[in-house]
Amino acid sequence: MPRLLPVAALMISAAASLVAHAGEVKVFRNSETVDPTEVARILDRSAPIKMRSLRLLDGPAAAVVASEAARPQALSLQVPFAFDSAELLPSARGQLDAIAAGIRMLPENQKVVIEGHTDAVGSEQYNEELSQRRAQSVRRYLVATHGIEGSRLQAVGLGEHDPLPGRGPLAGENRRVQFRGQ
C-alpha cells in the first residue's frame, strides 16, 4: 500500500472533517413539517450511529466518502420570536409541538440540550444573553405545554459562537434553536 505524503493526509483529514460536520445538523426551515419520528431518531443517543469509512484511491490524495453520511447529531429550527425578545410567537408552536412528540418517544432517561443561537449582529454579550433567554423560553414551553420533565431539558445560550456550516456569521439562519441528544 502506498504511503501518503503529509499534505495528502491533511487533505483527506480535512475532507473527512467537512463531511462529518456538514452532516451533523439537520436544519428544518419554517415551512417544513417536522416529523416526530425523525426527531426521536436524531436525538436518541442510545441508538447506534452508522459510520462510513474513507477509501483511499491511487492518484493525488483522492478520498471518497461512502454513499451514506452519518446521521445528524442535532436538529435546528428557526423558531420565531418577537423582535429583540424571547417571547415565542404563535407560529412557533407547530414545530415545537412536533419536537415535543419526538422527545416523548425517547427513553425516559434521555436528556436533551436546547441550544439558543444568534447571528453576529449586536454585541457578543447581548447575543449570549438573548440566546440563553430564548433557549429557556423553548424549555418552558415544552415543560408547561407538553409536560416534559424539566430535568430532561437543559437550556444553553451559545450566542453567535457556532454558526451553521457554510453560512456567514451574519446569516439569518444562525438565529435558531438547536436540539441535541445527550
Image (cartoon, helix red, strand yellow):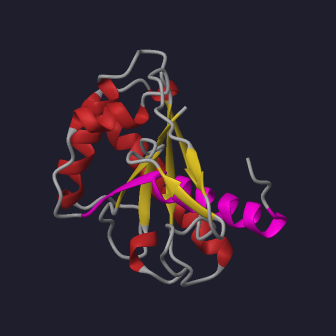
Residue 145 seen in the current view? no
- Quadrant of the rendered image containing residue 60: bottom right
Q: Give the percent coordinates (x, y) of residue 157.
A: 58, 56
Judge by depth and name the residue closer to the eye, 164 or 150: 164
Q: Which residues are magenta?
A: 5-29
Residue 26 on the magenta segment: yes
Please state the horizontal and vertical placement of residue 50, each as a whole percent of the image.
46, 33
- The x and y percentages for residue 111 are 50, 27
Residue at left offset 53%, top offset 62%: 131
User: Going 56% across and 80% down the picture, which residue do you hit?
Assistant: 120
Residue 172 visible to an observer of this rendering: yes
Q: Quadrant of the C terminus?
A: top right
Q: Residue at x 57, y 48 (%)?
A: 54
Above/below status of 21 relative to 66: below
In the rendering, at what x and y percent does residue 53 appear?
56, 42
Magenta: main secondary structure equals helix
Q: Nearer the viewer, residue 133 or 15?
A: 15
Q: Residue at x 48, y 16 (%)?
A: 109
Q: Nearer the viewer, residue 173 or 3?
A: 3
